[in-house]
Amino acid sequence: MLVLLDNVRDVTQVRPLLPGGSRSLAVITSRNRLRGLTAQYRVLPLDVLDPGASMDLFGGRVGAERVAAEPEAATRLVDLCAGLPLALAVVAARATLDQHPLGMLVEELEHAALDALDTDDPLTSVRAVFSWTFGCLSPAAARLFVLLGLHPGPDVTEPAATSLMAAPSAEALDELARYSLITYQKGRYRLHDLMRSYAAEEAAHRLSSAERTAAQRRFFDHLMHSALAATGRSDPLRQPITTSDPAPGAVVLTFEASTDADRWYAEEREVFGPAVAAAGEAGFDGHVWRTVWAIRHFLLATGRWREGERLQRLAIAAAQRAGDLEGECRARRGLVSCLVPEQKFDEAEHQLRAAVALDERLGDLIGLSNDLRGLAYLLGRQGKYAEALDPLLRASDVASRSGDHIELASVSASLAFVHHELGDHLEAAKRAEQARDMYLELVPDERDTVVASNRDTLGSIYRALGRYDEAEANYLRSVELQATLSYRHYQADTLVRLADMKRELGELDAARGYYLAALDVYDDLGFAKADDVRELLSLLG
């Protein structure tokens, strides 16, 4: 006898129905993984359909001609159905019966996917089918599923889920995964788009406004305070910002080393943008600019300048809504750091001068010195090094009045770079050595990007002075430090400068080795500078 048991709820429901004897077979389908049966039965997990199989199913229902007539709309429909055969079948049926253009169905699904996939029959309504599984959940798992409807990103970690619940979430996450409401991969849990829409609907229906606000605050606190902890590791000399304590129940991550912080940044990269936008929409303006401030280091280190520009503009708007001058000033400064690599110098100068006015109004001497250093850097990027001296000298006076050692060291490092570019290498050496000694007091292990950058500057200064051994030692120290920090392209830049020096000294084997090391980094990052290095290598023969 062959027994088919379809849509089984749990192990207790199915055990009495299993046939006995060696000549009988049972086929069981269930959204629950039924772990209690896995030791006795062969398990065949069925994932959602991949894009190719989804298109085969959809195209087989609507016909190849219609897919060929509207290929982009067909691809988008398949994508919106998230690989669910039921959703694909409903959309295909609507396209066939109504004969509407596929583009019209795309618009419906993009604006109200579950409504567009609703039918008169509860057996074929996607929303109804989802509700069957939801009804099987324990109270804790059901609560978490509803709260996940408030999460703005594409996937969620256990600490983020715990923050939403204000309670341990591991068992609830495991149950949701067991019922195939979420999928798990490499420490992250993901809801496909249709399931996220269903969770969002349930959150709107089942949670009060106060419950939604409290859960959102805990999640935004989790992300913001964890990002602040990460930037404290990755960029320890950065001036801190003011913030309130995290809400009870919000999980704040800690990081042992900058590499741990950078790894977390990379893992959360798809969450930051949606979370910042959601925080602004929900009225958490302080979380917007502080989170963006905290992730700026990661955005710059990975060359995500356009994304950074978009987020910094959101941060400026949020700070202005809140009337927060500190936030607006820091967001404008952050915007500049994203505009300069794109060579948007005019707007960068406008933003810096607005920041200067805000810091003068606030009486923030450290911030004002930072702004002035930014103006000097902006002028330097345009080759106007003589003009860059004036804001740096003003910054030196302001930093002295502030008494802040970090800012004083940073001004000295900036002056060293400008004097070097102007050809005054002795003055540059004095300033860079002064910065080096101050940094050593502040960060004895020197593991900070600005410290590594100053070592690179010292290498170039000593090279110009003909002190080649000292130049090489400082270049190598910069490379060593950058290898443990976020800005790997700076490491490659320094390797190229060291290789150039070795080539000029006739040490061609050493030059080739450093060029190749730089090439590996540029290629790994996908930077166009790799082509320049290849050309230099070809000249070496």
Image (spheres, rainbow, N blue to C red):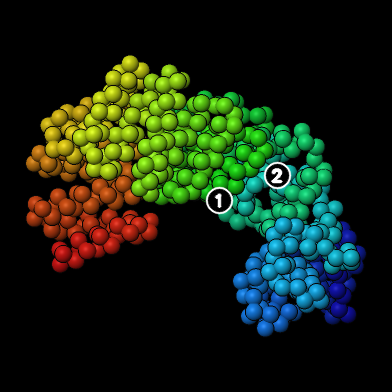
Which quadrant would residue 109 be assigned to in this image? Answer: bottom right
- Which of the two residues, 42 or 520, is positioned nearer the viewer here? 520
- Which of the two residues, 329 or 151, is positioned nearer the viewer here? 329
Residue found at x 44% / y 37%: 334
Where in the figure is residue 171, as x and y percent of width and height? 72, 46
**Dot 1: what SS?**
helix
- The quarter of the image holding the C terminus is bottom left
Q: What amino acid is found at the position of numbered circle 2 in the picture?
A: Leu
Where in the figure is residue 17, as x and y percent of width and height? 90, 67
Q: Earlier in the sequence, mark 2 or mark 1?
A: 2
Which residue is label 1 attached to? 270
Q: In the rendered view, would you say 434 is above or below 461?
A: above
Q: In the rendered view, would you say 393 is above or below 280?
A: above
- Which of the two residues, 57 or 171, is positioned nearer the viewer here? 57
Q: CA distance from mark 2 to mark 1?
A: 16 Å
Q: In the rendered view, does 301 fall on the left or right side of 476?
A: right
Where in the figure is residue 449, as x and y percent of width and height? 34, 38
Q: What amino acid is found at the position of numbered circle 1 in the picture?
A: Glu
Residue found at x 77% / y 36%: 209
**Dot 2: what SS?**
loop
Which residue is label 2 attached to? 150
Residue found at x 67% / y 43%: 161
Where in the figure is residue 66, as x and y percent of width and height? 68, 80
Q: In the rendered view, would you say 87 is above or below 273?
A: below
- The quarter of the image holding the N terminus is bottom right
Furthest-right residue in this view: 16
